Image (cartoon, rainbow, N blue to C red):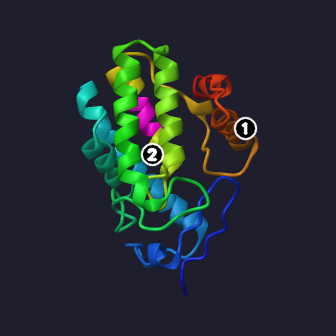
Amino acid sequence: MGLEIEYIEGQSPLDEDEKEGLLVKTISTRGELDEFEQRNIESAVAWTLRRNYKLEEILSEKFIMELHRQMFGEVWKWAGKFRKSNKNIGVDKFLVPTELRKLIADCRFWIDHKVFEPDEIAVRFNHRLVQIHLFPNGNGRHSRLCADILISNGLKRPIFTWGNRNLSKHGEFRKKYLEAIYAADEGDYKLLIEFARS
């Protein structure tokens, strides 16, 4: 029996090759997968709390990739590696490394030249990571943790709360989050900043 996953709005389906990367072969349902991923993510959060990161470290391809590996490396063999397939959202798979480098350069510019307030910088960083869609899975969770590390360690502001809810499950808070993401897609970051602080 293979892995059967039901997807909800805003989630990118895994292709069969990506599903083959599942390290825990006893997982067969979305609920079991969510449970194993959440345990791995909690370990990653503990890993991030062990030290303070410098801005230059946070805004590096190496750190961004390692953070995803820490979050999903006990569940997926491809954790921390750029996706090799195109998805329902995100840039073409061949453009992922280039777009990530552009985002890092843009974010450094925003910070150095105080183009936006710190909350908006971190939220724009989060949003662009989601738009690029670096990985086969976990992009939303990864981008929110990246934004949390950027705002708290790099920009020295309080960490975001993201509604204090699990945004991977269907419900009113996920709907509000997706509405904020869709508004940001159109260039309006107000709702996403408000949601990040809710």
Identity, as a three-letter code, of the amino acid under mark 1: Glu
Q: Residue at x 34, y 25 (%)?
A: 108
Q: Is residue 47 visible?
A: yes
Residue 104: x and y in percent read 35, 35
Residue 76: x and y in percent read 39, 66
Disc 2 designates what residue?
A: 142
> Residue 188: which quarter of the image?
top right
Q: Residue at x 34, y 41 (%)?
A: 101
Q: Secondary structure at mark 1?
A: helix
Identity, as a three-letter code, of the amino acid under mark 2: His
Residue 84 relative to residue 195: left or right:
left
Magenta segment, which residues? 144-149
Q: Is residue 98 magenta?
A: no
Callout 2 touching callout 1 (CB < 8 Å): no
Disc 1 designates what residue?
A: 179
Q: Main secondary structure of the magenta part?
A: helix
Residue 110 relative to residue 198: left or right:
left
Q: Residue at x 58, y 28 (%)?
A: 196
Kindly report which numbered mark, 2 or 1, lies closer to the viewer in this rendering. 1
Q: Is residue 53 visible?
A: no
